[in-house]
Image (tube, rainbow, N blue to C red):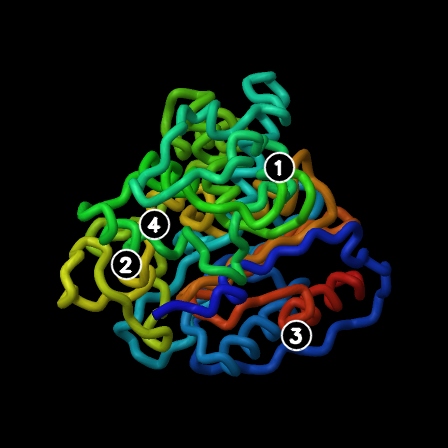
Amino acid sequence: MKLAPWALVVAVALGGCGGGSGSSAAPAPSPTFAAFRVTGTVVQKYASFDGPIQTYMTAQGVRAAQFAFAKNGTLLFSHAYTNSGDPSYPTTQTDNVMRLASNSKAFASAAITTLYANGAVQPSTPVFAYLGVMTPLLPTQTPDSRINSVTVQELVDHTAGFPTVEAPDPLFMMRDIEVKIGSEPLTKAQFASYIYGQPLLSDPGTTVLYSNVGYQLMGMIAEKASAEPFIAYLNAAILGPLGIANVTIGSTNFSARNPKEIVPDDADAGLGPSVFDLSASAPLLPLSYGGGDIVWEVADSAIDLETNAESMVKFIDHYAAYGLGSRSPSWRNGCVNGVATFAMSRSDGIDFAVFFNKIPCVVLTSPVIQQINALFDAGV
């Protein structure tokens, strides 16, 4: 129905992930991929970057991808790739948008960065009291005696004590929660109340446990502080000033999807019961569009934003790919069924993003990322 929890989110921050060596060695010519449709401006100087993307897509059976990079804020390269001999399969464009999965979290972190900066929220602010959540969702839940002490900074630091992606992850239990309360779709307020009633795994502030839930609550804090939806706050406070206008929320309902969205390839990932039908005979749907225990709009700040590679590159030129603050050498990936994204800021001023509409997950040690970084290191 969905990926094993360990595969849902893998994100690591590294300080200084390789810099350009200044080598003048000529890059090897890119291999020929006759079946590919490549869109975007041709820049002969950077032609060798197409090869690693196309090799990876061929090996993994990925049909749609985007890759863009900039240096010191100047966009140098942006291509979109279609790997399909079927002429009816849509040609991927550079201005299409793709789901980000956990790369959405970079935007949630940027929101907290700005809230700290303007004094709207303090690192020591108690999360649930601030959100006005003081009772659990279910009568069977008993709040943990430590829950009221969880602070905003502990969400950021992953020390709140919430379940990790390796444990049953509440973010991927939304249909289960709907069944328990007998109504759908689940709301953000209901989800927060459910989390309030769940036991913590450790004392707040003591143990690092990477959690999707923390990012979801960070988005809700931004909503509370700004008195507007999370996406509206992002557009007004963060994206608008950067000239980014194409970050949107992915729809749970397939018919309501963004017409510019590249549809995730979920076929190989199985199906799950519809979050809009709580019966035992609920229709089975792809994870990205209503099946598999998640209401995507509820999870916007954790895993449900979408944009294109160009805008991701522009964003991480100003805000950290991982963690709080302004641009810093770091990387983050996102991975759910039908989505594998990767964004990185290097210590030499290069920012790049590569998006695929199919798993497997892409991490720093993935061959495609190693090959891209090797080209940058060679001074290409």
Callout 4 secondary element:
helix
Residue density around tag 1, few if under 14, some if 14–19, many if 20 or more, within 10 Å = many
3D distance between C-alphas at marks 2 and 4: 8 Å
3D distance between C-alphas at marks 1 and 3: 34 Å
Which is nearer the eye, 221 or 346?
221
Q: Which residue is mark 3?
A: 367
Q: Which labelled disc corresponds to residue 289?
A: 2
Asked whether residue 176 appears in the rendered view, the answer is yes
3D distance between C-alphas at marks 2 and 1: 32 Å
Q: Which residue is mark 4?
A: 296
Rendered view: 151 above or below 367: above
Which is nearer the eye, 254 or 226?
226
For discs 4 and 3, the disc positioned in front in the rendered view: 4
3D distance between C-alphas at marks 2 and 3: 30 Å
Which is nearer the eye, 169 or 198?
198
Mark nearer the N terminus (2 vs 4): 2
For discs 1 and 3, the disc positioned in front in the rendered view: 1
Residue 211: image location, x then y, percent: 54, 50
Residue 51: image location, x then y, percent: 60, 74
**Contact (Cβ within 8 Å) of mark 1 with mark 3:** no
The kind of residue tagged 4 is Trp
Which residue is located at x 53 percent, y 40 percent?
Answer: 107
Which residue is located at x 41 percent, y 51 percent?
Answer: 171
Residue 238: image location, x then y, percent: 52, 30
Q: Which residue is mark 1?
A: 154
For residue 90, side relative to residue 379 (left or right): left
**Contact (Cβ within 8 Å) of mark 2 with mark 4:** no
The kind of residue tagged 2 is Tyr
